[in-house]
Amino acid sequence: MKRFFEAGFDVAFCARNNKELNQFKNELEAISDNQKVLAIACDVSDKEAVQWFAEQVAFEFEAIDVLVNNAGIFVPGQMSTEEEEVFEQSMHTNVFSAYYLTRALLPYMKGLDHAHIFSLCSTASVTAYANGGSYCISKFALLGMTKVLREELKPEGIAVTAVLPGATITASWEGTDFPDSRFIDPNQVAETIWQSYQLSPRTVMEEIIFRPMQGDLG
């Protein structure tokens, strides 16, 4: 998102943590005070909250050029032994949020010259891990949803891209003993998404897979 903002886009985003939400909003506004920044506290695992967020975005923006479905939660474990609510939490956060937000905002993307939807999947969308449990299940589902969306939106000229990064340095890896060299730099993921958006409307990168040079973290 920051990469698009730096390129002159107005942006809207949500998060559950108000402190982090406002910190990021202030960071963007320090870059430019001529662009719109809409930051809303929202728990995307709640369908009604997602729909309310979409309504606020639609009210503030006449058209939406880019939608990035980036919400995610990772709870390690195995399908046979993980707590029962982990499945529901993973599906609601990782899949349902993208489904409902996309449905709500699609009307504001249709008819544009260069609209693009990005779904942040994972290498866990194509590779099952023994300790992946419901996370893997939800990421396989998100990739499937993105493939369906790609087919549906071809006639509309809306590009759809699935982004599948491996282990990337984010807050979800805080406290790990692995060195930074085993992780992907999130700035490189952002830059690649931006470059994908820069392609001619005649071309779409359907899937982008990133892995650490030394391989996945199992």
Image: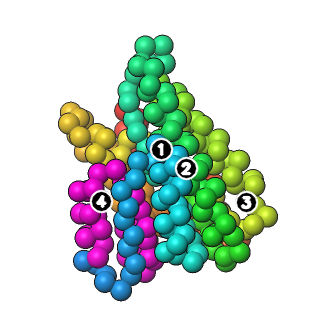
The N terminus sits in image quarter:
bottom left
Q: Which residue is mark 4?
A: 21
Q: Which residue is mark 1?
A: 46
Left or right: 2 in relation to 50: left
Name the residue at 50% across, 30% down.
88
Mark 3 residue type: Leu
Above/below status of 155 relative to 130: below
Left or right: 197 in relation to 178: right
| Mark number displayed over residue 153 | 3
Q: Earlier in the sequence, mark 3 or mark 1?
A: 1
Residue 15 among those drawn in magenta: yes
Mark 3 or 4, closer to the camera: 4
Above/below status of 68 relative to 184: below
Residue 146, horizontal then vertical, whole percent: 63, 48
Name the residue at 65% across, 41% down.
144
What segment carries the magenta color?
1-29
Mark 1 or 2, closer to the camera: 1
The C terminus sits in image quarter:
top left
Above/below status of 202 relative to 16: below
Residue 56, horizontal then vertical, whole percent: 48, 66
Inter-mark Cα distance, 1 to 2: 11 Å
Tell me the element at label 2. helix
Left or right: 187 in relation to 108: left
Are the residues at dot 1 and dot 2 in contact (C-beta closer than 8 Å)? no
Name the residue at 31% across, 83% down.
33
Residue 2, horizontal then vertical, whole percent: 37, 68
